Amino acid sequence: MISLNEKEYDNLLHIKTAGTLELLSQSPHYNRYEATPYEALDVLFNEYALERTDGFVDFGCGKARVSFYVHNRFSASVTGIEMNAQLYQDAIENLVQYRRKNKRAGGAIRFERCFAESYEIEASENRFYFFNPFSIQIFMTVIGNIMQSVERVMRPVDVILYYPTAEYVQFMDNQTPFELLKEVKIDRLYEKNENERFLVYRLGE
């Protein structure tokens, strides 16, 4: 597979997602925006495939790099959740350009501007992505919402953590019925920083 740099990958998808954004947030629980490296996404999804029938939710989606990558690669339905007004607007603008250039059929792709803990999980959604978007308190609430959704409509669900914090990992390992399904290390980056990895947790089969 040809290795593309960040800008080349953005151009391929007809979106703009580079850079970081310090959030002047009304809540100290939400972290700054930083996109998952395309290099990391390639490594993860070469080992962990999605189906067209999956419903993928990107919590703290920012400018929505992961959302567009997943939709383009797997044609799965994707929902991006973002509470910051500027980042949400950037995601919508990216969506306009993405749709203009990507006409092929696939699952729906949409964005919701709301706090993650208030988003109501849909029965069709079964893959949930987190790149440290918020505090452990909010993460715990969101995981609780996912588990309640599974109680209403039984189905296997996966939680995908990139650059997982110790707090997130301890919570998933010790306070939830999720089980670790897969660890995917970003080899070149992991050599310098052991946080450069994905953890995939599964609930149910």
Image (cartoon, rainbow, N blue to C red):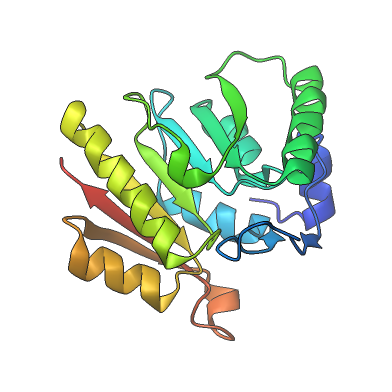
Q: Quadrant of residue 21?
A: bottom right
Give the residue furthest to the bottom: 192
Q: Position of residue 173 (x, y in %)?
A: 23, 68
Residue visible at 53% across and 73% down in the picture:
196
Image side of residue 16 versus residue 169, left or right:
right
Q: Position of residue 193 (x, y in %)?
A: 56, 83
Residue visible at 19% across and 28% down in the picture:
152
Image side of residue 47 versus residue 192, left or right:
left
Residue visible at 74% across and 60% down in the picture:
23
Depth order, front residue of 11/117: 117
Image side of residue 51 versus residue 4, left or right:
left
Q: Is residue 92 above or below residue 130?
A: above
Q: Can residue 141 be seen at all in this image of the molecule?
A: yes
Q: Position of residue 88 (x, y in %)?
A: 72, 38
Depth order, front residue of 2/154: 154
Q: Quadrant of residue 30?
A: bottom right
Q: Position of residue 167 (x, y in %)?
A: 38, 74
Q: Is residue 3 above or below residue 187?
A: above
Q: Can residue 70 be seen at all in this image of the molecule?
A: no
Depth order, front residue of 118/110: 118
| Image quarter of the C terminus | top left
Q: How many marks?
A: 0
Image side of residue 61 versus residue 2, left or right:
left
